[in-house]
Image (cartoon, rainbow, N blue to C red):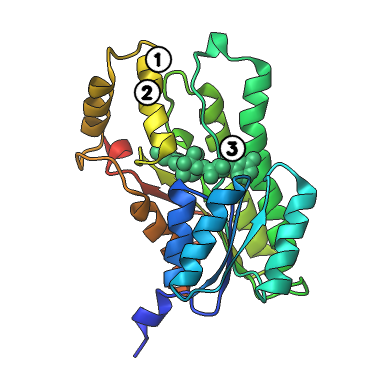
Amino acid sequence: MFDYAKAFRVDGKVALVSGGARGLGAEMCRALAQGGAAVLVTDVLEKEARGVVEELKASGAHADFLKLDVTAESQWEEAVGTATRKLGGLDVLVNNAGIETMQFLTETSVEEFRRILDINVTGTFLGCKHAVRAMRPGGAAGKGGSIINLSSIAGLIGVTALGAYNASKGAVRILTKSVAVECGQLKTGIRCNSIHPGVVWTDMGRHFLQNFVDLKLVPDLATAESSFKAAHPIGEFGQPRDIASATLFLASDASRWITGSEMVVDGGYTAT
Ligand SMILES: NC(=O)c1ccc[n+]([C@@H]2O[C@H](COP(=O)([O-])OP(=O)(O)OC[C@H]3O[C@@H](n4cnc5c(N)ncnc54)[C@H](O)[C@@H]3O)[C@@H](O)[C@H]2O)c1
């Protein structure tokens, strides 16, 4: 009989997570480590990311830290090299690092637009590029793998004052499909999928609500919270573990026939 419990685990795999210092990234590191993977926690926030590594190690997992600014190609080369040399391979990449700022279109500077695209899109592109080089047959890791890109429901629907972020997450969505198709057709054994969270209770999620107050789109934070909660038919914001669970599934062999898909984890937000 097929061993489903085993298929949903990631024992023996090596995972690299960008933006792993806090929020969704930190919880994904916990989920992957608990699932049996060795985890390379990366971020620009060194102290917080090292804290996550210590926590994982204390629970018996194999984990390490490397400083990685996702916009720097040389740092991606180093990160992929560290995963393959120090942790023994590269089977899973989670392109989680991202930023969000809100401003009306007419007030958005080109510098800010480019900064958001640089981190959210160029960072994801560079991660995919160097992970594919390592994971494909003949690469430094060479066993295929799973790439998971963090898009957003903002990659599917427009939101007031979120033009730059909307554009970036839409780009992540379709870049994911391009990587999936290319990797499939070139027989690399690499899958690539995107995750589209609704509002999740992290630093970013909290700032998102505060921005609606700051831009005078709602009178106060309580109104922002209640109206956004109501926009999720399940009636509450997501928790980091809701996104980490989806990540673990896409990293595991239980999802071996899923590639190029967009996994919407949004409490029903986009179903309405
Ligand atoms: N929280 C939400 O409601 C929500 C919803 C949809 C999508 N997302 C996406 O999920 C991902 C994680 O979001 P979060 O809520 O945990 O955000 P967060 O702000 O709490 O954490 C983001 C992490 O990315 C890191 N980071 C930022 N710029 C970086 C860079 N240049 N290089 C490396 N690391 C960098 C930060 O240091 C931080 O640790 C993001 O891509 C975000 O767009 C979040």
Q: Residue at x 75, y 65 (%)?
A: 81
Callout 3 secondary element: helix
Contact (CB < 8 A) between labels 2 and 1?
A: yes
Crowding around mark 3 (Cα neighbors within 10 Å: few <14, some 14 to 19, many 20+) is some
Residue 84, quarter of picture: bottom right
Q: Position of residue 4 (x, y in %)?
A: 35, 80
**Figure check: 172 above or below 85:** above
In the image, which disc is placed on residue 171? 3
Q: Position of residue 69 (x, y in %)?
A: 68, 45
Q: Where is residue 106 in the image (x, y as percent from the top left)?
A: 55, 8
Tag 2 residue: 210
Q: Is residue 148 visible?
A: no
Instruction: Decide if ligand 1 comes within 8 Å of the CB at mark 1.
Output: no
Instruction: Decide if ligand 1 comes within 8 Å of the CB at mark 3.
Output: no
Measured in 3D between alpha carbons, the distance from the residue under mark 3 to the one under mark 2, in whole angstroms, is 25 Å
- Which amino acid does the dot numbered 2 rest on? Gln
Measured in 3D between alpha carbons, the distance from the residue under mark 2 to the one under mark 1, in whole angstroms, is 6 Å
- Which amino acid does the dot numbered 3 rest on? Ala
**Figure check: 123 above or below 54:** above
Earlier residue among tags 1 and 3: 3
Instruction: Decide if ligand 1 comes within 8 Å of the CB at mark 2.
Output: no
Measured in 3D between alpha carbons, the distance from the residue under mark 1 to the one under mark 3, in whole angstroms, is 27 Å
